[in-house]
Amino acid sequence: MPNKLIALAAERLRAGGVVAFPTETVYGLGADARNEDAVRRVFAIKGRPAEHPLIVHLAEIDQAGAWAAEITQPARQLMARFWPGPLTLVLPARDDVPRVVTGGQDSVALRAPNHPMALALLRKFSGGLAAPSANRFGAVSPTEAWHVRTAFGMQVDQLLDGGPCRYGLESTIVSLLDERPRVLRPGALPLSALREVLGEDGIEFGEQPNLASPSVSSSLPRVPGSLAAHYAPATPLEIHPIEALPARAAALLNQGLRIALLRRNQSLRGKPSLPSLPQFLLPARAETYARSLYARLRELDRFAFDCVLVEAPPDDETWWAVNDRLSRAAASR
Ligand code: AMP
Ligand code: MG
C-alpha cells in the first residue's frame, strides 16, 4: 500500500481538496463531507445538478451515528452483515449534516467501501468523504484509474490508483426511511443477499410514493442513478433478444449505418446465425459481465459506430443490476 500517497491524499482532503480513489464498486470523487466548499467543487467538477445527493463514505460502522439521526434495527443488521461492502443505506440525516451533501434532503446515504485503499484513506482522513462516481454527470462510471484521468485530468488534486474495480458496478442503495427497507437502486450487492437478512417479503422496490409529490419536478429524481438516461456512452445502444438481432441488424445496414454487436461470450449453437459485423464480447456470467461492462462501453465509443446492438442478457434476478444499467445506457438522450 502506498502509505505516503494515502497520507498526502488525506492531507489534501483536510485542506478542502478533491481526491479520486478506488472502491470495490467504481472510482469515487471524494471531498470532506463536512466542508461545503469542497463538496461544491465535486458537484462543479462532475457537472452534477445540486439536487442529486452524494453518498458519504465511512471507514467504520461506529461512524454512522455522526451522520444518521436514527439507526433503525434493519439498518443495524444490514451494516453488521454487509459493511464494508457494496451496500449504501439511506437514513434520516442529523441536523448538522451539510444539506449540500444530501441535495437539500433530510436524509443521508452512507456506505463503508470494501477496498483496502479506500479504507486506508478513510481511516487516515478519519471522517466522512462525500464521493459520487468519478465521471461527468450522466456518463459511464470509471472502473479503472485512467478512466478518471481521461475525464478530469488535473481538475482533481490527486488520483489514487488501485487497479480495476472488483465489481465494476455501483452499490445497491436501500432506503430505511419507511417502515420496510426499500431498494432504490439495484447494484453490486445482489438481491438474494438482502433477502438473507431481511427475509423474502422484507423488501420494497422503487422510489417512495411521496417522492412523486407535485413540488418535486420529475426531472429531478432524488436518486440520480434513477434517471432514465444515465450511465450512458456516446454511442447509441439498442438492446434486443438474440433472436431479433439478425433482422434489426439488416434493417440498420439497409439504412447505410455503421453498426456493431455487443454480446455474451457463449456458444451460438441453436441460435440464429448472426450477420458478419464487428462483434464485442462480454463474459457470460452476470458477475464478470458487470465487471467489464463499463470498460467495454468506453472502448466501443472510440469506434464511433452509429449504433451498437446489444444482446439482451437473461431477464432474471442475478442480472437485475446489469439490466438496469444497460437499459439506462440505451435510453435516448
Ligand atoms: P453516484 O454518483 O453513482 O455515486 O450516485 C450516488 C447515489 O447515492 C445516487 O444514486 C443517489 O441518489 C444516492 N443517494 C445519495 N443520498 C441519497 C439520499 N439522501 N436519498 C436517496 N438516495 C441518495
Ligand atoms: Mg454516478
Image: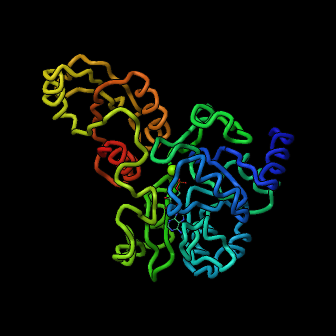
Rendered location of residue 218, percent (x, y): 34, 65
Classify residue 180 by image quadrant: bottom left
Q: Quadrant of the C terminus?
A: top left
Q: Quadrant of the N terminus?
A: top right
Q: Residue at x 43, y 57 (%)?
A: 186
33 above or below 106? above
Q: Is residue 105 left or right of residue 16?
A: left
In this picture the colour scheme is rainbow
Rendered location of residue 148, percent (x, y): 60, 37
Number of numbered labels in the structure image: 0
Q: Residue at x 52, y 52 (%)?
A: 48
Residue 120 visible to an observer of this rendering: no
Rendered location of residue 59, percent (x, y): 73, 60
Rendered location of residue 143, percent (x, y): 56, 39
Q: Nearer the viewer, residue 328 or 45?
A: 45
Q: Is residue 316 left or right of residue 142?
A: left
Classify residue 109 by image quadrant: bottom right
Residue 203 visible to an observer of this rendering: yes
